[in-house]
Every structure is written in structure tokens, then in C-alpha cells.
Amino acid sequence: MPVKADIIINNARVFTSDKSNPQAEAVAIQGKHIIFAGTNEGVKEFQDQSTRVIDGKGCTVTPGFIDSHFHLLWGSIWMGSAQLYEAKTMDDVREVLRTFAEQNKTSAWVDGRGIRYGIIPSRKELDEIVSDRPVYINAYDGHTSWANTKALEMAGILQPGKEAPGVGVIVRDENGIATGELRETAMGLVSDLIPETSDVRKRELLKMSIKKINATGVTSVHNMNGDIKELMVFAALEDAGEMTLRVYTPYHIKPETSEANLQEAVEMAQIQGDFARGGAVKFFMDGVWESYTALNIAPYADNPEAKPDGIFSAEHFTRMAAASDKLGLQIFVHCCGDGAVRRTLDGYESIQKLNGKRDSRHRVEHIEVIHPDDLPRFKELDVIASMQTSHAPFSISEGDVWPARVGEERWKKSFAWRDIKNAGAHLTLGSDWTVAPFDPMINIHVALNRELWSPDDPDQRLTLEECILGYTRDAAYAEFKENEKGQIKENYLADLVLFSHDLFAIPQEDILTAKAVMTIVDGKIVFEA
């Protein structure tokens, strides 16, 4: 006698991400697992009077989406700041900041998140908006900030004399006075002065964010920054039965991190909950192209004098990565420039010689530019390419500074999703929220429809099937969970999403018309439109 299902979705176009059974009409769920994926007729034997039956109406059902590059706690806390993601002019910034300041009169700081490059000229414009309180504005990519005069004075960096640690830059005028622009580690000189969000408020913002994330069909994320304290925030939410998003959190290795500090990553790897777990480490090899901190092989096209060294030297990275690998930890490395990608691949190759080859599934994150010589190395070294399609300027007419920084010679190997996949790499997809929106449909839209910047550029677009696999089965593989989730398959976790349309029937240029209408996590409906 077959076990009876709690939930059945029938009459659907079920894209299972399962090679052995790629398409189905119906899926049955009992408890937190999938018990059937097959025909409308076949699913009937799992139904009784207590089963909730959902008519899919011919719309697509997929495994729950796994976002492979995310900043969950950072992003949730930033939801409590002034939101500048949609600002296009200083007038927009003025309106958002003044409204925020008025609504948060008891807040000691006015802080904003998500600003694009090229909007804020200097601290003086921020002074005109708010002068009686310190103002701190962080760029959408988290690598550059702008502060008003009061904030710079509080940090003791307005006048010449004090410089930033490491690769940071305090941009100064011809007299040595800080202009208000802070790059990389210079940001911490000001941001560290902002009072930390209380634990109660963190939890409140986190739950609010997770609810919105689930509503787009995302059921798991690979969190790209962290320590044991951050992981325990997620674990506490899981213990309270309030977690509806699976979170894989690495330990952030900084240049000052010692090998002894890696024991914290080992402790995090012992935490293996259904929703919160550790087991990895994260490095930043470079910054970003926009702030001239990406590590490149050839000089910047629009500023040949900019020659960033990278955050880790080749020797330093190889030493710390080898120590991490020896402890059995997976490694993620932020690499925007082709020089950073090469340095990281060189390090992975050295690790294999030092420690021996194992199923490590080490990863390179972003890969905004890659040198052609490094394309085959992903397959040769079994390294995963983790990429975020919304990072690519959709067209050359958008006015984004990115194409000018890189220059036309490198456009052919910029955001080279197709070339990397064709080279045999495991390609996993994500958003890098808050750098880009977490809604997978926005990121899939860019992957399907990105315009050529030049007629001579290769077409780097992906297919819809490749996008869904990159967000499901391939993303599960990228976190060693391919035997538990990422597919609609018997005995797999019941993490699924039902869409408003048959994704394969609508023109790809109209993909944004489709939305998640139901999200199921661990066999429970966590969002229903």
C-alpha cells in the first residue's frame, strides 16, 4: 500500500533536473520528502481525502532554486538602511536620504545602501542633504562608499595624515583633503563607527528578508561571508523552527587571518543542520573593476596607471588555501579580474600537488573576465565556476562604467558564461544579493537576453534549461548536496517552486512576466500567491 501524500501538484510541466526522468506531469510530497514524480495517472495512488491537491494548470514546476552566491545577513541588515538601488541622480539620492533621516530621527547615523557609481561627486553634496549627522553611503557592490564631512571627521581621515590599511584607498583632492570616496578597506574606517544592529533587530530583519526571498522561489543560498557568530544566528532561527531557507556559510579568511584561526572554520563545519551548516572558507582575491581594484593581466583600458596588487599574494593564498584544503574545507574565492582568476587557479593547481587530488569542489566566484588560456583549467582542475548573470551590463547603451574599465579588447571574454560552460566547467548560478536582485527570473532574463556590446563579440547567452540546472542540480552539486536536493526525485527534499506560466512556452524576451506563485520548503508551503 503506497504511503499517502500530504501535497500533490498535478497537471503541471515538471522540470525535474533529473537526468533519468527529466519531465513529469505530477509530483507527490509526504513529510519533507518527494515520494513520486511522474504522470497524472500514476500520482493518483498517493492521494486520499487528506491530501491537498494543487492544479498546476500546465505551468512549470522546478526544484527550489539554490542561489550560489548570497549575502544573507548583511543584506537583511541593509534592508534597514536607506535604499538607493533605484537612484539615478543626486535628486533621487536627496529624496531618499531626507525621507530616511526624517523617519529615523533617533538614529545617530544616516546610512544608505545600493548606490551606483558616478552619482555622488563628493562629500559636499552629502553635506547639503544632511550636515548635522554622519552620512555613510555604500555602493551596490559593497566595494566603494561615500561619506559626508561629519563622518570623515569622526573617523579622523578628513585631513591628510591617516591612510587606509591594506588595499584601501581614501580618495583625496590636490590638497590632501578627503573627497568622501572610500575604496575597499578604507570603508571600514567609517563603517566601523556605525553602531551595530541589535540581535533582536537582526532577527526581525532576517525573517522579513527570508519571507521575500522565498516568494521568488529561492529555497537555499550559499552565504558568501561569515564566521561562527553569523552561522549561529541562522542556527538559532532553525532551532526555533522559524527558518525556511537553507544556508551554507563559509568562514571568511582575511589577509590577517592566521592558520590557527582556521579552527573556527573547522568548528563551523561541525554544524550540519537541515537549514544552517558550515564546511567552507571564503577568500577575496581582488576587488571590482568599477573601483580599479580588480586584479587584471593587462592594464585598465581607461586608466593604465591603476595597477592593483590583489588582496592575497600568490604565496599567501596558496599557503592559506592549502591549509584549508588539508582540513577538508571547500574553498570559494572572489575573482573579478582575469589576473585574480589565474592566481586562484594557479593556487588550486599547487594545492593538488601539495595535498593530493580529492573531491574538493573548490570554486571561483564571479569570473567577470577570463583569459582564454585559463578556460580549460576549470575542467582540468575540477574547479566550479560560480557566476552571477546580473553582474553583466545588459547592453552597451546603459551607461555603466564597467565596459570602459575593461576595454573592447576584453569584451569577448567578459561574463563568458557560454565559453566557460562549453569548456566543460561545472557552472552554478546566483545573484550576489545585495549586489543584484535575488529574484532568479531577473538573473535568468539577463542570461537569456543579454545584448552583444559589439557585433564581433561571441554570444555568451545560456539556454533556459541551462539556467534552471545552474540554479538547481548544478548548484546542489556545488555544495555537496546533489544526492539530497536540486532535483524533483523520489526521496529528495521537498523544496519546489510552481510558476505562473509554462516557462518553456513563453518567448524568452518575456521571461520576466513569469513569477513564482508557490514555494515549498521541507514539504511545507512557505509562500502562496
Image (cartoon, rainbow, N blue to C red):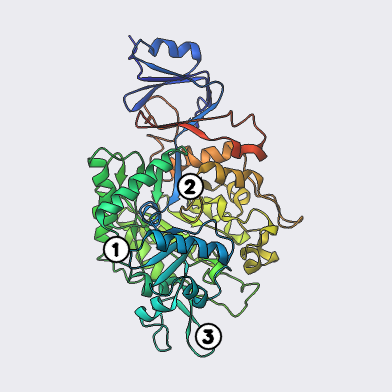
Which secondary structure, mark 1?
A: loop
Give the Cα distance between marks 1 and 3: 31 Å
Residue displayed at 35% across by 29% down: 524
Q: Sort mark 1 into few (<14), some (14-19) or many (20+) by Cα contacts within 10 Å.
A: few
Q: Are marks 3 and 2 in contact (CB under 8 Å)?
A: no
On the picture, is 69 further left or further right than 322? Answer: right
- Quadrant that contains the N terminus: top left
Disc 2 target residue: 438
Q: Sort mark 3 into few (<14), some (14-19) or many (20+) by Cα contacts within 10 Å.
A: few
Q: Quadrant of residue 90?
A: bottom right
Residue at the bottom extreme? 175
Which secondary structure, mark 3?
A: loop
Q: Sort mark 2 into few (<14), some (14-19) or many (20+) by Cα contacts within 10 Å.
A: many
Disc 1 target residue: 196
Disc 3 target residue: 173
Q: Quadrant of residue 192?
A: bottom left
Q: Does residue 130 sit above or below 63 in this rendering?
A: below
Where is residue 155 shown, x and y percent of the image?
36, 79
